[in-house]
Amino acid sequence: MSQYLKPLPNPTPTSRPFWEAARRHELSLQRCAACGKFIYYPRDRCPYCFSDRLEWKNLSGRGKVYSYTVVRRASSFAFADTPYVLAIVELEEGPRMTSDIVAPPENVRVEMPVEVYFDDVTPEHTLVKFKPA
Amino acid sequence: MSLKGKAAAIGIGELKPAKEPPPTATALGLMAHVSAEAIADAGLEKNDIDGFLVGMPFSDPGMLYPASAAEVMGLAVRMLNVVDIGGASPAGMIWRAAAAIDAGICSAVLCVVADLNRIGDQRPPMVSVQREFEVPYGNIGANCGYAMIAHHHMYEYGTRPEQMAKIAVDQRANALRNPLAVFNEKPLTIDDVLNSRMIVDPLHLFEIVSPCTGGAAVVVASPEVARRSKNTPVWLLGAGEYANHATITYAPSLTDSPIKPAAENAFRMAGLKPADMDLVCPYDCYTITVLVTLEDAGFCPKGRGGAFVTEHDLTWRGDFPCNTHGGQLSFGQPGLAGGMSHVTEAIRQLMGRGGDRQVKDAALAYVNGNGGIMSEQVSLVLERRS
């Protein structure tokens, strides 16, 4: 297996459960027990109502492409293997995530249904990406 | 509280942006040059400056930056700060300077930004949440965010690539009459823009700013100091600032930006409306930024931006003068000084110093500064009082 050279997430005490779930191939986000909203990225308090009653919940992994771009020339040498599809995915449960769509660029559309795809980029790191549903 | 008529811009200094930095240039040195020019232009002495607002350059960032930059220039001031709201920093400096003046703390505030464009320079680190949730997916720099805004605008409102391209074309026509613009020799056509290399769909190379070396400074003064100036003072009538996200993914909307509340507050403070403006200088890191600004600042209804820029002549002699210096797209983006170019151009035009691109009888201007990915917004209404 070739060495993975792109930047990797460095989990914090706040975000570690999200990345540990990803390694188990589960999409787990915080849900605010006070206002009921799902939250991405992980927080210490709900960004909507500022409650600290946050519970981890597994999600369906289904969503749609809110918007996307095909990166043909990247702003970083680490991502020189263009093109790649960067997107904002709106999850069925509400929150939006920055991620990659693993699909040929010409197949991607705004509002297209997608489902989670766990990319085990190293033995320790799994990135949460999406693919056409 | 209102800042209406409480302070005026009385002097400007600005360098012609350069694609390659001169071998002897440093960011601190460029700041000194443009500051000296602005202070002399205002008819003041360095010792008259008692407030200092500065942007941190990418090429030489560091802690305790304002005192370091002030020390290099030999300034002694009653107020000093870095304004760190991205491309909105220069416009943000103008109202902060006015607020310090209105509070009686300062009488003449120097606002300065400068930077070198050198690949491989040290860059300030991104905040942990962006390193963790954006960078691993390749969401680096500003291109991707604005491309996703443009895609969604096209999806939601049917905006077309040639409509966005028209903005770059008209601004280039303006740049041809600006000796300071970096791209001021060759006109641009819509086909030129659409045939330029696709960088991040749907944005082409000529819809994206070009990083440069350069700098700019503005002196903002109290009414008492302004009355002594040899220049026609350009008064701040209204200011509004707003931000509700950093990364565009977490913004409430991709196409309704925080420019709306910023502009509403600026026009309310001024007691004026968009239609009263004689020229506009909207921040233009990309073509789509101008289009969304014109909608959200109220110059046309939401979703009509594409039709609006097609139906109007955005050149200095047109029916809707917009970025008469060429905008950053043709002027160049010397770091944060790119955002100062909209401020200096509005001041120049209102002082009647627009040269070959002077907008006839220009008395009122709208300026918008935009930071990050449509994040920090600062709207200003400026006036030459006749």
Image: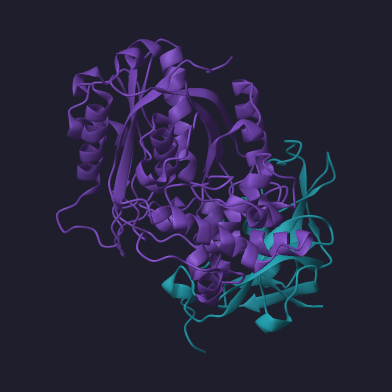
Chain colours: A cyan, B purple
Image-quadrant location for residue A61:
bottom right
Q: Is residue A60 left or right of residue B236?
A: right
Looking at the image, residue B289 lies above or below residue B161: above
Q: Is residue A123 left or right of residue B76?
A: right
Q: Position of residue B117 (x, y in %)?
A: 31, 58
Q: Tell me the residue at 65%/34% (across/down).
A: B275
Can I make out residue B61 in this image? Answer: no
Q: Nearer the viewer, residue B320 or B281?
A: B320
Can I make out residue B90 in this image? Answer: yes
Q: Position of residue B383 (x, y in %)?
A: 49, 25
Q: Tell me the residue at 49%/55% (across/down).
A: B171
Image-quadrant location for residue A76:
bottom left
Q: Tell me the residue at 53%/49% (across/down).
A: B372
Q: Position of residue B308 (x, y in %)?
A: 68, 52
Taking the view exactly as shown, the residue that stands out farthest to the bottom is A1
Q: Position of residue B205 (x, y in %)?
A: 49, 69
In the rendered image, the quadrant that contains the N terminus of chain B is top right
Looking at the image, residue A102 lies above or below residue A63: below
Q: Is residue B156 left or right of residue B292?
A: right
Image-quadrant location for residue B150:
bottom right
Q: Nearer the viewer, residue A54 or B4?
A: B4
Looking at the image, residue B173 lies above or below residue B7: below
Q: How many marks?
A: 0
Q: Nearer the viewer, residue B238 or B152?
A: B238
